[in-house]
Image (cartoon, rainbow, N blue to C red):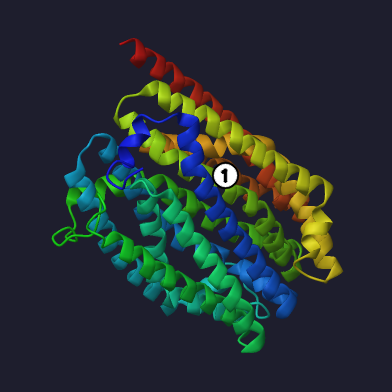
């Protein structure tokens, strides 16, 4: 498939073939990225200690907040790019790429600087104790110094997928992971940099991948490439991108609030080791969530293009296939969490009490996972076809409407168990609402097909 015709094939090729072509590279990339996060935690847990694992868990809200701003630009603009390519509006698609670079630069610099200025009080607010603060601070100082690199790298990878190059996006992610895995033990063990070494390896790996992405997008033979005159922010592109990207932004923002409440609840009812247990259980569960996210990334350009081209049968087919695959993935997570939680937790630490608490928490986290994949795909589907309000609402149902109230109430009655129980309860209720909204949308597609 040539570089010039890759995007238009989204409207003509077999849906199953397209989903395989786009989703498999994204799944491989996200799996590799998730494996790196797990390996990184293992290096930190085994090489620095159990309190370092707790310190790393304290940084999750900061990482989620940074990801919220990155997703608002990257996901929103890449979705808009898919729709514009479907409409064959190549001039606007070209402007979108330039605007993504400008927006990521501005947001990356401003966010990093503000967080660095107040890092200690922020980490204390997020649940750090005097014992875990040094680990959390050492990690986040390095990450925030490279924040603009992270935003740019993630944003351009999203643009690569939507511009018809899912394999290149996969290569960028895998190369980042491999470089990370090579550098992290060198910095942590050989150079004795501890948890700061893990963060340094992450930023350096992303910088190398970003250079390769920029080389691709400066190639004039690409249908969408960097040109002069496209970096000036266009009001319509910015507002449309941020509007579509508001759903993942709010999802990550709510995730930030959720992790703060989880950390504070676990700190109150279980102490630093309970936070470390959540850090381990979250890494394991997130491994499977990242695979579904890769699947969603593969679906996004296909659904966006065909919705823009008003080919609703193709939109329906890609949605059904994606839901089926996502359900299989999250069911696998359920089986791991129920039958071998101690085995997977043991990879992160030799501390028996931390292993016991992590296995206990993981069982709760995956209790409703067989239907979580369906809920995740539904949220991404509405976002992919530009229905920002529905996607935002579904993003908020699990975390803001259900999970946060559960985290505020249940721990007062059930202690640490109340924190863990809040997660599957909110998953269940959010999935029911997602099913109802998706059913209504299918009815709309049937009406539009008749007309």
When the figure is inspected, residue 166 is found, relative to residue 230, above or below; the finding is: above
The extreme front residue here reads 1
Instruction: Give the image location of residue 322, x and y in percent.
Output: 54, 34
Which quadrant holds the C terminus?
top left
Whether residue 146 appears in this view of the structure is: yes
The extreme left residue here reads 229
Q: In the rendered image, which quarter is residue 100 located in?
A: bottom left
Residue hosting label 1:
292
The extreme bottom residue here reads 191
Instruction: Give the image location of residue 110, x and y in percent.
Output: 33, 70
Q: Seen in the image, is 444 located left or right of residue 285?
A: left
* Residue visible at 60% across and 64% down in the picture: 36
Q: In terms of depth relative to the viewer, which is nearer, 124 or 247? A: 247
Which quadrant holds the N terminus?
top left
Q: In the rendered image, which quarter is residue 199 located in?
A: bottom right
* Circle 1: element type: helix
Q: In terms of depth relative to the viewer, which is nearer, 28 or 141? A: 28
Whether residue 393 appears in this view of the structure is: no
* Residue visible at 19% across and 61% down in the picture: 231
* Residue visible at 54% across and 72% down in the picture: 179
Instruction: Give the image location of residue 450, x and y in percent.
Output: 35, 10
* Residue visible at 52% across and 72% down in the picture: 202
Looking at the image, how many numbered discs can be counted on the residues?
1
When the figure is inspected, residue 124 is found, relative to residue 12, above or below; the finding is: below
Instruction: Give the image location of residue 20, x and y in percent.
Output: 51, 39
């Amino acid at each position: 498939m040539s570089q010039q015709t890759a995007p238009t094939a989204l409207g003509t090729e077999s849906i199953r073939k397209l989903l395989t072509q786009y989703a498999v590279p994204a799944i491989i990339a996200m799996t590799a990225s998730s494996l790196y996060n797990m390996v990184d935690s293992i290096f930190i847990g085994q090489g620095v200690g159990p309190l370092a694992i707790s310190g790393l868990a304290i940084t999750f809200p900061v990482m989620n907040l940074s990801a919220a701003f990155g997703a608002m630009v990257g996901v929103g603009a890449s979705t808009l790019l898919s729709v514009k390519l479907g409409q064959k509006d190549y001039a606007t698609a070209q402007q979108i790429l330039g605007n993504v670079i400008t927006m990521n630069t501005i947001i990356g610099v401003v966010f990093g600087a503000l967080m660095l200025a107040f890092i200690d009080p922020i980490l204390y607010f997020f649940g750090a104790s005097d014992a875990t603060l040094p680990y959390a601070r050492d990690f986040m100082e390095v990450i925030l110094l490279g924040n603009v690199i992270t935003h740019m790298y993630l944003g351009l990878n999203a643009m690569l997928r939507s511009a018809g190059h899912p394999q290149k996006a996969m290569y960028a992610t895998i190369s980042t992971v491999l470089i990370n895995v090579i550098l992290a033990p060198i910095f942590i063990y050989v150079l004795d940099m501890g948890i700061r070494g893990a963060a340094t390896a992450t930023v350096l790996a992303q910088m190398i991948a970003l250079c390769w992405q920029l080389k691709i997008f400066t190639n004039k033979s690409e249908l969408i490439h960097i040109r002069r005159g496209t970096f000036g922010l266009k009001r319509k592109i910015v507002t449309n991108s941020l509007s579509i990207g508001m759903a993942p932004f709010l999802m990550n923002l709510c995730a930030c609030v959720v992790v703060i409440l989880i950390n504070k609840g676990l700190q109150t009812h279980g102490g630093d080791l309970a936070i470390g247990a959540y850090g381990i259980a979250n890494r394991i569960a997130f491994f499977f969530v990242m695979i579904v996210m890769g699947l969603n990334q593969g679906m996004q350009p296909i659904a966006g293009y065909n919705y823009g081209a008003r080919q609703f049968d193709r939109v329906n087919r890609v949605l059904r296939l994606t839901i089926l695959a996502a359900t299989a993935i999250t069911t696998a997570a359920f089986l791991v969490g129920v039958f071998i939680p101690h085995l997977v937790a043991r990879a992160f630490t030799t501390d028996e009490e931390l292993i016991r608490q992590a296995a206990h928490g993981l069982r709760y986290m995956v209790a409703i996972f067989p239907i979580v994949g369906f809920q995740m795909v539904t949220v991404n589907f509405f976002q992919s076809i530009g229905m920002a309000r529905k996607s935002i609402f579904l993003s908020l149902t699990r975390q803001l409407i259900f999970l946060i109230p559960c985290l505020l109430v249940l721990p007062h009655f059930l202690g640490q168990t109340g924190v863990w129980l809040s997660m599957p309860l909110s998953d269940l209720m959010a999935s029911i609402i997602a099913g109802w909204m998706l059913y209504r949308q299918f009815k709309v597609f049937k009406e539009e097909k008749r007309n």
